[in-house]
Image (spheres, grey):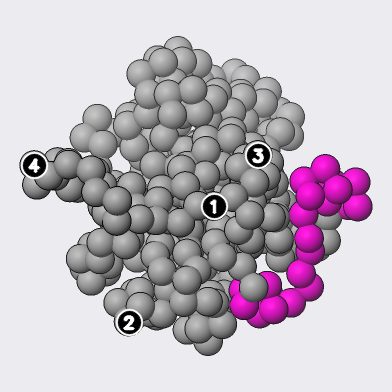
Amino acid sequence: MSGHKLKVIVTRKLPDPVEARLGELFDTEFNTADLPLPRESLAAAMARADVLVPTLTDRIDAGLLGQAGPQLKLIANYGAGFDHIDVATALGRGIIVTNTPGVATEDTADMAMALILGVPRRLKEGADLMQSGDWRGWSPTALMGHRIGGKRLGILGMGRIGQAVARRARAFGLEIHYHNRRRLRPETEQALGATWWESLDQMLARVDILSVNAPHTPSTFHLLNARRLKLMKPSAYVVNTSRGEVIDENALTRMLRAGELAGAGLDVYEHGHNVNPRLRELPNVLLLPHMGSATVEGRLEMGEKVIINIKTFADGHRPPDQVVPSML
């Protein structure tokens, strides 16, 4: 593979230094419009490319993979999540899939912590009041929120990001509780001051704030369905910086509108950018446009990982961030 430059097609605009380096190393085509490629354009790219560099806005299913050219041997995803790629079909066709794990851990945990602080303290309502020009001065009873010190934080998904959230939350005086497929090692639990709940239902009934940090897989789709959300206290808050599909968004919206939950802070949504319009109307909901990993440093590091994965593949070696069947 080292005898010629690989044909690399990038589906979205990436940071300038990342594109510059990709252009130096490979025969690279870029998407200058920075809009998601239509399905037919994505299919055409996969028919020509040796390497495809997609993002989470590209739905690469079995149908598209069936149209890939025989020369497409690597999908080097720009991002840690890979639920938008039919990895099993790709692997069955001899196409390696890589991702960029670990890069966004601290950035996403920072954003989760911002929402954990911001929603109970009614930051959105306060900011809206100031922006509108309607503030008439301080009042003893205005915009009273809730302190978070001493409250119970439930973390759903205790991987790298969940643990990073736990470290931050503990510093703010929150009690750490978590539910995970596998229990953490005792020394990790002790370091985080974390209590494991084998039963998600039992944990949900007891926490004051829930932070969702689980990936989207078939087993986590609507893991927080209407039944489970109803187990939570009416005074509880829900924060999600992982994947929107983990929560039944319609059920969450109904409960927030009915006062059956105190509030929510969301950075991700079940249907991508098509956010439930009723969510936008609620004053106790802080909505962000999938900003969790949006730092200059993080985006550059993601690009570096993509380049390393492609370069390693081009040199005939196993890419360091290969997605393997046990991860599915």
235 lies left or right of 279: right
Tell how many labels: 4
* Pointer 2 or 1: first along the chain: 1
Separation of disc 2 and disc 3 at Cα? 33 Å
Tag 1: amino acid = Ile
- Residue 248 in the image: state x and y as whole percent: 44, 75
Q: Nearer the viewer, residue 32 or 199?
A: 199
Residue with the mark numbered 1: 148
Separation of disc 4 and disc 1 at Cα? 28 Å
Q: In the picture shown, does residue 5 fall above or below 191?
A: above
- Residue 275 in the image: state x and y as whole percent: 28, 63
Q: Residue at x 17, y 41 (%)?
A: 137
Mark in the foreground, 2 or 1? 1
178 lies left or right of 24: right
Report if the CB atoms under discs 1 and 3 are less than 8 Å apart: no
Q: Residue at x 59, y 28 (%)?
A: 305
Q: Can residue 38 be seen from the camera position used here?
A: no
Separation of disc 3 and disc 4 at Cα? 35 Å
Callout 3 secondary element? helix
* Pointer 2 or 3: first along the chain: 3
Label at residue 258: 2
Callout 4 secondary element? loop
Mark 4 neighbour class, 10 Å CA radius: few under 14, some 14 to 19, many 20 or more: few
Q: Nearer the viewer, residue 137 or 177?
A: 137
Image quarter hosting the N terminus? top right
Give the residues drawn in magenta, as a range.
185-205
Residue with the mark numbered 4: 133
Q: Can residue 244 be seen from the camera position used here?
A: yes
* Pointer 1 or 3: first along the chain: 1
Image quarter hosting the C terminus? bottom right
Separation of disc 2 and disc 4 at Cα? 29 Å
Tag 4: amino acid = Gly
